[in-house]
Amino acid sequence: MRSPLPRRFSRRRFLAHGAAGAGAFATGFAAPAILRAADTWGDLVGRFVYDGPPPERPRLTVDKDVVHCGQYDIRDESLMVADDGGLSNVYVYCRERRLDLCPELEQSADEQALLDNRNCILVPHCLKIWHTEQDLFIRNSEPVAENVAFSPLGDRPANIVLPPPPAEGATATWRFGRPQRVPVPIVCNYHPWEIAYILPLDHPYVDISAADGTFRIEKLPVGRREFQVWQERPGYLITERWPRARFRVDVKPGVNNLGTIRIEPAAFEKG
Amino acid sequence: MARRPTTIETLAIAALALWLGGCGPADPPQFQLNTEGREPDSIGRSQREAILGALDRLYGTPDEPGVPRDVWLDLDRLRVAAGPTFGDEQGRRFGLYRGHCARCHGIGGDGAGPAARLLNPYPRDFRQGIFKYTRTASGAKPVREDLEQTLQFGVPGTAMPSFARLADDDRANLIEYVKYLSLRGETELFLLQVVVDEDEYLPLSRSMVLEDGVLPLAELWEGAADLVVTPPPPPPVATREQWLASVERGRAAYRNEAARCVDCHGPEGQGDGEEEEIHDDWNKPKAGMTASHTRELARRFTLPVQELRPRDFTTGILRSGDRADSLYWLTHIGIKGTPMPAAGPQPGVPGPLTPEEIWHVVHYIRHLAGQGKP
């Protein structure tokens, strides 16, 4: 269900665009921002690697709806490491707010971010949402009723029942009202092993490392930017190199490659 | 002839007087930093000072409350509710919160007043900004009428009494003060996240605190009125036949597997469902994976963990009292801050039951509780 409220021109973005528009006007109504993209925006890429043998993923206790959920091999997802060390589900996001936005990003953004209840887990385990552009679309693909509950700081908490399809209530749409500084846990009160995370931001400058550990934040405005690093096990991912779990990059046009970022196993032992 | 007290008796009386009265005027009470869930020594001195200083500038003190710029709180009402209890020459009462609420809810609204430890459920900790019983859609703040209802009727089955005897204006003053404590508490949580968790550089930008840690939270309260759920008219139950038919339909909806009422409240509504170790949002962080883990966590919290017991409707005691509309809201919207979810449709969320089915469930629950029979 698509939310009825318009969102394409929120007050904050209108103001941000107003400022950018004034700049364009001052330069003689020159080129639209989209034509200036190549020298105005840069990508940040890198790859997280777990600097140790891949840890075991223990099987989780499945003691509710056992007839259905018991058929799945449900394992802990809090630290996902590929055989070659690729570390997935690490959030990297720009800490600044009210950034210039690349028009291409606005035009290509999906209207929704999808959270699915499938095989008695929440899929994906980690998601991001540009909440001023996107709604969260929640779906139950199971033959049993599911629940999705989350409590973002200073925003409306949700506690939603999703009956099994084909009931109309098997899907739901949620809109976040404000950005968060860290990902918010999503749980199911019926199935205590189910957990996922979502990071609502008011900009698109975030990525979650993929199964091979790589991430790419596209079309960042050039200039000095500060990024936060977060992973669910320790929370803020503090390392010797990043004692505040953040780093600064002077973003230049083109690709800004951080290379391989090795994380010691000890970084995941706290919290 | 009266006996003169002995030296020992005199000293004992003097010591007692000193103990009761102190040596001089007591220090005015201060808001204590919210350290729930944290190791007490995990917050540095400069961090503590930065948070409390920012809160002090924005919200004042328990004796002299303040209102942040551009926030709708009514300072005149706060001044009547705040501070020590006393009456003026015109017979007006001041310090209403300390007189009526602080013993349970604590001076700073932490839900950990002197009596709190003895109560089950614990008094509400206002600082998370979550209120259980509202008529507003999932997750929304309460409207004034919700808080007024709680003060008017109390919460049956808990230690929260009715304050119907207070003047309307005094209840309005207390409601304003509860909103104040709640907003202040949420700003405090924001500051704890920024200053302690993120280890942000100090001093903090005052405009950042206002724009990110105060105004968006205040807007949520302002927007609550737009999210009120209006119940449709209930199905007719004037006759015994209509009543029993509605009760029967309610029983069927209650047992509908999509709604999962039975999971917690049991097949006959006796609060004996299969779900175990249920906690509300205030107690969930206190519950460890094992008993020893819970004991280890306990030092981070003021009050021990308390389990939530799903309501046994057959006791006849409902949190909504005997008000059918309140029970409707509670079923349609759920109970915020608890695992009790919304059963009814809300913006973007169809939910497992229709409003009509919810009315039937309400009648079924009232039937179990011995209420409402025509």
Image (cartoon, rainbow, N blue to C red):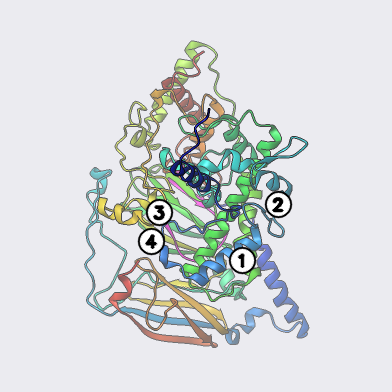
Location of residue B188 by image quarter:
bottom right
Measure the C-alpha gap from mark 2 to mark 1: 17 Å
Residue at x-position 39% and y-position 62%: B39
Given this view, does label 4 or label 1 mark the residue nearer the observer?
1
Residue at x-position 65% and y-position 31%: B166
Q: Which residue is mark 3?
A: B301
Measure the C-alpha gap from mark 3 to mark 4: 33 Å
Residue type at numbered disc 1: Val
Residue type at numbered disc 2: Trp
Q: Which residue is mark 4?
A: A124
Q: Residues within 10 Å of mark 2 (few under 14, many from 20)?
A: some
In primary-sequence order, the first of circles 1 and 3 is 1
Q: Tag 1, which chain? A: B
Q: Do residues under tags 2 and 3 come within 8 Å of each other at their CB atoms?
A: no
In the rendered image, is residue B130 in sight? no
Given this view, does label 4 or label 2 mark the residue nearer the observer?
2
Q: Nearer the viewer, residue A108 or B23?
A: B23
Given this view, does label 1 or label 3 mark the residue nearer the observer?
3
